[in-house]
Image: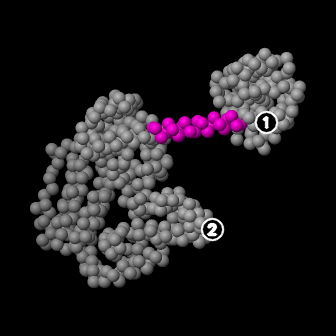
Amino acid sequence: MYNVIIVDDEPVIRFGLKASVNWDQEGLCLLGDFRNGEEALKVMEQHKVDILITDIKMPVMDGLALTKQALERFPTLKVVLVSSYTDFEYVREGLKLGAVDYVLKPTLEPEEFSGLIRKCVKLIEAEQTVEEKLQLIKQAAFLKEQKSLEQIMKRVILQDLEPINFQEQFAWLQGSLLIITMRLNRAEEIEEQFGFLFQTMILEDVQDLFYENVNQGICFPVAETEMLFLMQINTEPYKVLETLKTEIEQETNLSFSFGYEVISDVSAVKEGVEKSRVACNQHFFHEYQHIFRYKSFPKENAVPLRLDEFHQFLLPYDERRLTAFLQNRCKEWELGRLEPSEIKKEACEIVSHLFLKQLKWELLFEKCEQLKKAETLVQLQQILFQQIAEYDHLIPKNQTFSQGENQVMTKALEYIHKYYTEELTLQTVAGHIHMSRNYFSVLFKRHIGQNFIDYVIDLRIKKAKELLRNTSLKVYEVADQSGFKDVKYFSKLFKKLTGISPADFRTTQRN
């Protein structure tokens, strides 16, 4: 809806102009009528006005002065002049200034005046169409340029190529640059709840948001839950990170951690990327902090892990002394003298030495994978001590299940097919069959060939297809009855998996 104002010092003329057009029917909003140009300009400063209808001769500020000042401030404004027979020279001057047309007071006909207003509307719409096309062209060129630079940077970072001189092509790369590594928090929990594709869609949303707001920068995924940003920096980097973090988390309703480094020249981009990743790893030691600048790890003071000491607690097994040993090792980890990857490696060595001769390799592998996925040191310690606590009673249970795995899986699948449209988690199903969550995860993947949540999502998508084919339910109702509580996520996931939206799928199937 376009906004209109009328300006004339004669009340009867203002009344006649207002009454000559059915503004609502024409899709217009009449903001008001005013006695002179000064009053009109004040309103135009506060509200967007699309069409200005103004008398030429008025006190305080006449129509020509109003037209000139208004078009200088608002170039897309459409102006219609109201004049008498004796004002023709003024009309000519008004048309030169940029007025669309004029109407004569003595011969004012409602239909003619309405036609003139429609002419203004068509001009506005035509200009908007041209502007939209130009914006699309600019956006396509911008994205093409960004994608080109993304590919160059990927080759430099991931393929170990030397940086090439491309500052002339991308002028913003000259000078200091901010390099950021962003990592999704609680990634395993999110994947378990929504599936692997959800993380991919989240990173795509972040990339779209970044390019909507930043012209001098690029970003692209470098891992399943990790994204790299490169942008020009002219201010305090921490403030830039705070703004970026706020915008992304408000858009996605998820939490992220950021590591950054500033480089003075694009030739140092590879080193800067590595430092930003190391900085992001600091979240491992500080779970309530989410923005970090690079600092090196003082490895020379780290006390090495003594597995020979560890072995003496196993033959015979002494849980109390083993726990004390692990607690001391955790204190060493908390000093931050080892990188997170080195700490996780030590934790895996401890678990491997403890369970190597007792467990199937699949379960031992799963235990180590659990440790590697820990996002913070606190989480790693919790997982490690939980695994140690299972040492005494986990093995007999596994031997029992190994004799009847098919029966256990049959029971689990019956439960899944009964409740897949409701809140269903790996832990819920594992509890139903009286099995540990971790072991059930390994067993399920070995028997079915895919992860638990992906299997459940497949069932829900099949249900959604059935409802779309055979019912007239709205898309949000289909989502809910298929087990998806978020219709936006359902629509994006459905299109990702099928290639078309739920609405288009319904149309195609019915046709």
Residue nearer the viewer, 132 or 274: 132
Q: Residue at x 69, y 23 (%)?
A: 98
Q: Is residue 335 above or below residue 417?
A: above
Q: Residue at x 24, y 52 (%)?
A: 341
Where residue 484 appears, x then y in whole percent?
Answer: 51, 64
Q: Is residue 406 visible?
A: yes
Image quadrant assignment for residue 144: top left
Q: Quadrant of the N terminus?
A: top right
Q: Which residue is mark 2?
A: 472
Magenta residues (range):
121-142
Q: Which residue is mark 1?
A: 115
In the figure, is residue 442 to the left or right of 144? left
Q: Main secondary structure of the magenta part?
A: helix
Q: Is residue 389 above or below residue 105?
A: below
Where residue 64 appears, x then y in whole percent?
Answer: 74, 19
Q: Secondary structure at mark 1?
A: helix
Q: Is residue 477 visible?
A: no
Tag 2: residue type? Answer: Ser
Q: Quadrant of the C terminus?
A: bottom right
Q: Is residue 128 magenta?
A: yes
